[in-house]
Amino acid sequence: MNLFSLAVRNIRLNGKKYVMYLFSMGFSVFTVYTFLALMRNEIVMNAFQYDTRYQSLLSSFAVIILVFVLFFLISSNNSFIRARKKELSTYALFGMPNRRIGGLLFLETAMVGLGMLITGIGLGIFFSKLMAMILLEMTLVNFAGQISFSIDPAALYQTAGIFGIIFCLMGLSGWRVVARFELVDLFKADKVSEKKTKGSFAVLILSILLIAAGYFLAISRDPYVVVLGSIPILILVISGTYLFFWGGLPKVLGMVKRNKRLYYKGANLISVSAVSHRMRSVASVMATIAVLSAVAVTAVATGFTLYANAERNTYSNIGFDLAFKSGGGNIEEQVAAVFLENGVTVLDAAELPLYEIDAPKTPYTADGMPLLTPGNPVRVYSESEYNQLVSFAKTTMETASVAQGEGHFVFPYSPDRIEHALLGKELDMNGFEIRVTEVIRSNVPGFGMLNTLVLDDEDFTMLLQERKITPSLVDGEAVHAAVFNYEGALKNRQLNQNLDGVLTTRGLHYKTAFGLYNESMETFGLICFIGFFMSGVFIMMTASLLYFKQIMAAEEERNQYQTLRRIGLEGRTERQVIRRRLLPVFFIPLAMGILHSVFAMKTADTVVFAHMIPSANSYLHVLGFSAVMYGVYGLFYAIFYIITKAQYGRIIRS
């Protein structure tokens, strides 16, 4: 039998056992080809021609995937070779030289790699149109073009070249493994007992302290602390995670063993002993999976939260479908004519005069950030006009109720810091004392000014009569705010273009919900698309790596289960042992990864979401969306666990 025939035979015999490994390899090829093809798709590139973030985000993701794929394939290949050492020793026993055994492994790797390369690229080509449609549907809500089926030769050649190199490195690695071992080492490889690790109570405590310190920095309410501490947070949490699995978890298992009542209960003795026995070989894998799971679920949870809140974020920043400042003339009539020409029904329309007041002579700051400084006027509303504006706004803003001598301060950012700086303070507004009784976070009523003050109607009228409140002027002409809400505001591209033509020619500064919403969807949709793919790749590869490790362990533990059955181990108890043997290996890393993600999302809320989601507790809102992604991620992990458990049972019973 020549090497080619022998390689085909080995692949056929081992194919069912390592099907998940092969599936993950093919999925990695599919992912890389898909993203390389999307980066070069002419229709997609034309759709994103004004957005440079498209290429940079996809390129960055492609690099991350390639690095991770390389790590996964090399780790899996090393385990695969280790599991086959006895088989390889048999070839050597019958006189096959190491050079030919290494050549056999290289040939097998090349054949499997070629098969997965063809499969992955074939699936990528077949689903290329669908992937492009999903990307454009998620990112360009008003895309009206047609996507045709296409094959990108450059993406095909690049994918083939990249994975050709990776598979060659894997084959050479197998050749090197064979060359390093003597016949007796190979033949006794599965007889060598794995060294046990007892763990360390000190390491357990240290790992918990490191992770807790990272969490403590992550939950800071100060965005500056979070941003500056991002690298220390990563170092603390990652190092604590690895220490926990290297020395902490073995110690926990040792503590379980010393608890006689728990340890000797049912199947616990066998399952805990089996997990403890394998901790040295699987600890690094479990720690890596915990870290990568945290990255994956955080990425997809962030992308999904951003995507799902795009419309809410749009109106929290603008408030209306159309808003602009006008100095008079017939601009409102021209805008109304545009709505009429496009057959669009106007739901709400209002014009409000804009006023301002000089800032207090005493400057106010919030944690060193200038807030109210002399020379910078403050937008000011009467209570009734402010409430009229709020009634039209598509936000969760509430109407104001202001007593005489009091005022509500409106600022677009960081309400907690502003409250600490201004709440209860007496502001000297041109000789009139105003006590701040409420701080509101909103970007809606400013109309070009950062600070807004809402006063009682009588106080406003008095200050206006005394000319302490003055109309806002542009080129010496009083201006007013015009706001419109209308049907189909987020979908009607033609209407938006017509409005742009009218308002731009008049030199007016305006905002439309259509513009910000589409810009948000381009960015958030792309992040969400990448996050879903990243999570899919990480799930496939990390769960496949665990599957592969446990299947190798089942091969080595088969004789032990046969011995246990001879002395009376029942089928029901055996199933309990398998379940308790595999559950910790799969779900402890997943649980730790999700826990890391919960605190990572708190960091994301402090830096990003708190400024996007107008809610009393935006973090709870973020966790609600994140929980959906945690559940989906856990569901896929559960599927891999069930598949692994079934295959593990078949192996030990064979």
Image: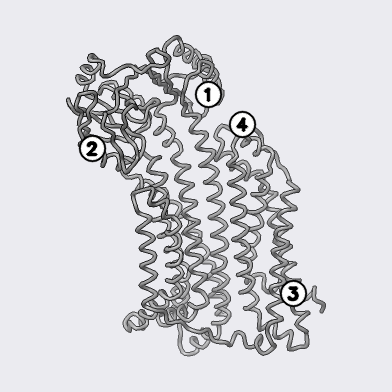
- Res 23 visible: no
Q: Which dot, 3 or 4, sits closer to the camera?
A: 4
Residue found 82% across the figure and 77% down from its top: 2
Looking at the picture, tell me which residue is in the foreground, 603 or 37: 603
Q: Identify the amino acid type marked 1.
A: Asn
Q: Where is residue 1 shown, x and y percent of the image?
A: 82, 79
First of labels 2, 3 by sequence position = 3
x then y, percent, for residue 480: 38, 17
Mark 2 or 3: in front is 2
For mark 3, does the 10 Å Cα neighbourhood hold few (<14), some (14 to 19), or many (20 or more) residues?
Answer: few
Q: What residue would you read off at disc 1?
A: 496
Q: CA distance from mark 4 to mark 1?
A: 15 Å
SS type, badge 1:
helix
Q: Name the disc covering residue 598, or none.
A: none
Marks 3 and 4, how far apart at CA: 52 Å
State the residue position of label 3: 9
Mark 2, other Cα within 10 Å: few <14 / some 14–19 / many ≥20: some
- Between the C-alphas of marks 1 and 3, the distance is 65 Å
- Look at 72% across and 43% down and name the residue there: 150
Q: Is residue 256 above or below residue 304?
A: below
**Earlier residue among tags 1 and 2:** 2
On the rendered image, what quadrant is the C terminus found in? bottom right
SS label for mark 2: loop
**CA distance separating discs 1 and 2:** 40 Å
Q: Is residue 532 visible?
A: yes
Q: Earlier in the sequence, mark 1 or mark 3?
A: 3
Q: Counting other residues with Cα less than 10 Å from the Cα at mark 1, is it few (<14), some (14-19), or many (20 or more)?
A: some
Q: Tell me the kind of residue under disc 3.
A: Arg
Q: Determine the residue positioned at 48% across, 72% down.
A: 582
Residue that numbered label 2 is attached to:
423
Secondary structure beneath dot 4 equals loop
Whether 17 is drawn above or below 50: the answer is below
